[in-house]
């Protein structure tokens, strides 16, 4: 993160008002193996809570947040995908129109880091236009059990053109910074590229269909 960006990023506010008009609607997709902490990162950011127990995500979950940077209001669709292989075809639906990818691994689980390359390939094969992409080493509160060195991850991120950050959903380290930084970069990108009204309509196109299918197994038990 560059020095001059820090004050700007710190000035971003999360708004509770969901009905407020917005300039941008960004879609950010969280990807990575089962259990790395995707849902926990989102829950920490959206609700400021953390649960020790693990409930794997079924299909895809969705959260919406509103952020204000200077006088620019942005709505952010956050897609929380399932790491389990059996949901992979559903995940594909969310890749093609994301503006940003967060590739997440668990710093205590080397396999989850080694698999990041597969998540990257899957994402970039389906979306060549993602603007900002992060490599996230989560669970950094468990440094004593670390299996992936920061230097290795940093080198990999550099090779792949990703921004590298370590986070902890548990201790709330770098969680807000991650999302604010991501949105800040997106705003800078679209503002600099002088988006036209037409482009903006495309950028803001509705995703109600996708939202409807977010929980394919919901109520399947009939209870
Ligand atoms: P899937 O939905 O199956 O893809 O998994 P996920 O990536 O969403 O993982 P989830 O957020 O459900 O977290 C899995 C387990 O890791 C849970 O038991 C969490 O409590 C734990 N966990 C998540 N983030 C952290 C963290 O930053 N630190 C620690 N110590 N545990 C974490
Ligand atoms: Mg999950």
Image (tube, rainbow, N blue to C red):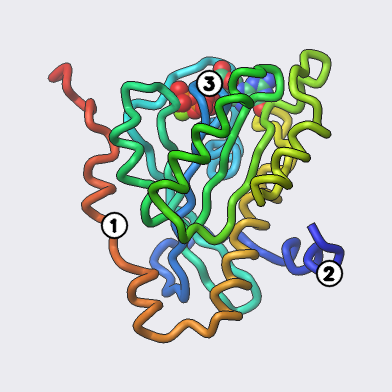
Residue at 55% from the left image edge and 80% from the top image edge: 193
Pointer 2 and pointer 1: residues touching (CB < 8 Å)? no
Near mark 2 (Cα within 10 A), the count class, few <14, some 14-19 or many ≥20, is few
The residue drawn where x is 76% and y is 19% is: 142
Q: On the rendered structure, is 212 left or right of 105?
A: left
C-alpha span from label 2 to label 1: 35 Å
Residue 196 falls left or right of residue 116: left
Name the residue: 73% across, 42% down.
Answer: 165
Left or right, 156 with reference to 42: right
| Picture coordinates of residue 220, whole percent (x, y) | 17, 22
Left or right for 197, reference 111: left
Per the model, the C-alpha gap separating discs 1 and 3 is 27 Å
Vertical position of residue 199 compared to residue 94: above or below? below
Q: Is mark 3 within 8 Å of ligand 1?
A: yes
Earlier-in-chain disc, 2 versus 1: 2
Please provide percent x and percent y for residue 14: 59, 59
Q: Which residue does the numbered mark 1 point to in the structure image?
A: 207
Residue carrying label 2: 4
């Amino acid at each position: 993160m560059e020095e001059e960006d820090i004050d700007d990023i710190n000035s971003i506010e999360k708004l509770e008002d969901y009905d407020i008009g917005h300039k941008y609607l960004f879609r950010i997709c969280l990807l990575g193996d089962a259990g790395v902490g995707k849902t926990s990162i989102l829950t920490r950011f959206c609700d400021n809570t953390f649960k020790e127990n693990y409930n794997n995500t079924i299909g895809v979950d969705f959260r919406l947040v509103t952020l204000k940077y200077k006088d620019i209001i942005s709505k952010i669709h956050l897609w929380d995908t399932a790491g389990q292989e059996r949901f992979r075809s559903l995940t594909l639906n969310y890749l093609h129109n994301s503006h940003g990818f967060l590739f997440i691994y668990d710093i205590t689980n080397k396999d989850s880091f080694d698999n990041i390359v597969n998540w990257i390939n899957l994402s970039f094969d389906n979306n060549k236009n993602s603007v900002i992409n992060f490599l996230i080493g989560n669970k950094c509160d468990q440094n004593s059990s670390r299996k992936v060195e920061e230097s290795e991850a940093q080198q990999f991120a550099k090779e792949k053109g990703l921004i590298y950050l370590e986070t902890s959903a548990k201790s709330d380290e770098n969680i807000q910074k991650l999302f604010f930084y991501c949105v800040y970069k997106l705003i800078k990108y679209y503002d600099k590229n002088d988006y036209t009204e037409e482009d903006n309509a495309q950028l803001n196109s509705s995703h109600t269909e996708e939202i409807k299918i977010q929980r394919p197994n919901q109520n399947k038990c009939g209870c």
